[in-house]
């Protein structure tokens, strides 16, 4: 029968089930390291063997000893038994055996102690030597494995630290590169922004300089044009004053000979001519557009008319608003020029719109005649053909603008003098009639007082200056012809019309004709009104009051002109 000795942790080979892989063994090995950091692997065995004492075996083991002796296993058993029965001694006992004592010597010492108990045969001694050698080899293997484990741990720890250090350096390098890239990007963005800002400032500077240069050139041109226009206007005014003065002097000379200096026969011919113009316009323009073959054209013209019509109601004293309206109407009329019939129809419509606006708006607010008259005058300059339609419409609605008067005791006479019938077929009231004609006369008189815009002067040859379609002399004729009208034909409307003329144009007439105009004004408000004092005309009374105010301080009220406010 084979004997298996007791297992002891210090005699187990590392290849068996009991290894030194536990953490406690490794920590123990680290505790046994000497001062210079190197492991003293022999010190562990020395400590274990020196720290044990031997106990005597009991008497019950004698029989077993005999058997072991006969089998030659006494020494081995004693060795194992001694080791199993050893008990740790105090730590101080470690000094009895030097730390550097070889393992073989320590094992021999153990065998010697065991031999004191029993006599051993030579075979037992050999077995003991074998056991000691076995234990020595096992311990050497175990210590070797432990050393390898420690070395591996040290190597792994070193590799771990090296890997951590490499990772730390890699992260720091990445951070450094990222920071450099960020700083570089920021610097590039800053540089690019500075370049863009510099380019922007340079572009703004050039644009500003170009605008300033353009404005300066424009201002210089406008100033030159203004000076030229003023010079031309001054020359035209001086010429007009000279012509008017000569005409007045001639008229005064003739008036001394005869009071009937006004050629009423010629005035009647002119009136009939304008009346025929209205008939021709209706026949050749209005009726022609109604023909079936002009149906498509009528539709287009109707659209243009609906675009133009609201513009007259939008007129104000604001110059920018006025310019916009003139520009829009000019565009619409220019478009109509492509067709002769359409062009004539639009011009006739504009003439009717001007007079209709004078009948309604100006009657309520006399000052509104300024923008309306300004628009009408500039349209006459832009489209000279408009004069044919506009003057005919003025004369039809208010024949007093050319000095025509006839008796109104017949229906024909009333129609000639511009009377209207109401919806019930009766003639309109005197007050309504007087107000309508006063409004029309106001717009007509304001047109005569207005000066030509320098824009139109610049577009024409200096040698052929623009001719005013309704010069101030037309107002002179209006007043003088009214004064020369026979008293039996004079009615309240004559005084109402001259009262409207007084407020809208008397001041400019004084500027144009000086003393001669002052004489006419005095005759109008004094002699003329007194000649019909017995008729109690309200228009005459108002005209007389205007004359008295003028006689007191020599000033006259006038309508506010166009402005930017």
Image (cartoon, rainbow, N blue to C red):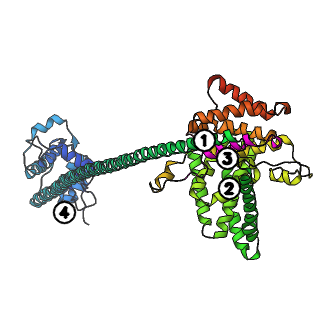
Q: Earlier in the sequence, mark 1 or mark 3?
A: 1
The quadrant of the image that shows the N terminus is bottom left
Q: Quick one: 17 or 71, which is closer to the camera?
A: 17
Q: Is there CB contact under 8 Å for labels 2 and 4?
A: no
State the SS at label 2.
helix
Label 3 with label 4: CB-CB less than 8 Å: no
Residue 203 visible at all: yes
Using a 10 Å C-alpha cutoff, classify the residue at mark 3 as few (fewer than 14 neighbours), some (14 to 19) or many (20 or more): many
Disc 4 to disc 1: CB gap under 8 Å: no
Reply yes or no: does residue 483 show up in magenta.
yes
On screen, residue 292 versus residue 446, left or right, reads right
Residue carrying label 4: 71
Query: Is residue 460 toward the left or the right of residue 341 in the image?
Result: left
Magenta residues, start to end? 466-490
Kindly state the secondary structure of the residue where label 3 is placed.
helix
Residue 236: where, in percent of width, then height?
Answer: 50, 46
Q: Nearer the viewer, mark 1 or mark 2?
A: 1
Quadrant into which the C terminus falls: top right
């Amino acid at each position: 029968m084979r004997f298996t000795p007791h297992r002891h942790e210090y005699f187990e080979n590392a290849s068996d089930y009991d290894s030194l892989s536990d953490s406690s063994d490794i920590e123990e090995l680290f505790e046994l390291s000497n001062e210079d950091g190197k492991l003293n692997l022999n010190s562990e065995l020395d400590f274990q063997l020196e720290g044990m004492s031997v106990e005597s075996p009991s008497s019950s083991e004698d029989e077993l000893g005999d058997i072991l002796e006969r089998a030659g296993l006494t020494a081995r058993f004693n060795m194992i038994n001694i080791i199993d029965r050893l008990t740790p001694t105090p730590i101080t006992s470690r000094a009895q055996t030097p730390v550097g004592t070889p393992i073989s010597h320590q094992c021999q010492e153990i065998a010697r102690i065991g031999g004191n108990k029993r006599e051993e045969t030579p075979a037992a001694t050999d077995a003991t030597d074998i056991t000691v050698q076995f234990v020595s080899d096992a311990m050497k293997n175990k210590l070797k494995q432990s050393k390898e484990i420690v070395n591996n741990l040290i190597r792994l720890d070193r590799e771990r630290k090296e890997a951590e250090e490499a990772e730390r350096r890699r992260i720091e390098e990445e951070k450094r590169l990222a920071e450099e890239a960020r700083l570089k990007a920021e610097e590039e963005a800053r540089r690019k922004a500075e370049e863009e800002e510099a380019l922007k400032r340079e572009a703004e500077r050039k644009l500003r300089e170009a605008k300033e240069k353009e404005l300066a050139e424009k201002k210089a041109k406008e100033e030159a044009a203004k000076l030229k226009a003023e010079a031309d206007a001054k020359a035209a005014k001086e010429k007009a004053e000279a012509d008017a003065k000569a005409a007045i002097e001639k008229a005064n000379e003739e008036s001394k000979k005869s009071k009937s200096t006004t050629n009423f026969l010629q005035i009647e011919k002119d009136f009939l001519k304008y009346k025929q113009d209205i008939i021709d316009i209706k026949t050749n323009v209005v009726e022609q557009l109604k023909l079936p073959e002009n149906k498509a054209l009528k539709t287009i013209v109707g659209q243009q008319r609906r675009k133009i019509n609201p513009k007259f109601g939008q007129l104000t004293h604001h110059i920018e608003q006025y310019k916009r309206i003139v520009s829009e109407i000019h565009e619409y009329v220019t478009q109509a020029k492509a067709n002769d019939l359409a062009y004539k129809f639009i011009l006739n419509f504009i003439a009717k719109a001007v007079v209709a606006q004078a009948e309604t708006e100006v009657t309520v607010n006399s000052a509104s005649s300024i923008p309306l008259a300004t628009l009408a005058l500039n349209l006459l300059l832009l489209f000279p053909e408009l004069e044919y339609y506009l003057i005919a419409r003025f004369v039809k609605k208010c024949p007093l603008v050319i000095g025509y008067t006839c008796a109104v005791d017949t229906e024909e006479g009333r129609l000639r003098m511009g009377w209207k019938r109401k919806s019930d077929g009766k003639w309109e009231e005197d007050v309504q009639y007087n107000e309508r004609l006063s409004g029309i006369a106001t717009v007509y008189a304001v047109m005569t007082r207005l000066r030509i815009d320098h824009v139109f002067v610049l577009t024409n040859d200096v040698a052929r200056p623009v001719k005013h379609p309704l010069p101030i002399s037309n107002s002179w004729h209006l007043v003088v012809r009214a004064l020369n009208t026979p008293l039996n034909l004079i009615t309240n409307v004559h005084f109402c019309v001259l009262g409207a003329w007084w407020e809208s144009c008397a001041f400019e007439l004084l500027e144009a004709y000086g003393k001669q105009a002052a004489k006419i004004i005095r005759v109008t408000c004094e002699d003329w009104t007194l000649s019909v004092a017995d008729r109690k005309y309200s228009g005459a009374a108002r005209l007389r009051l205007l004359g008295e105010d003028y006689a007191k301080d020599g000033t006259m009220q006038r309508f506010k002109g166009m402005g930017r406010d």
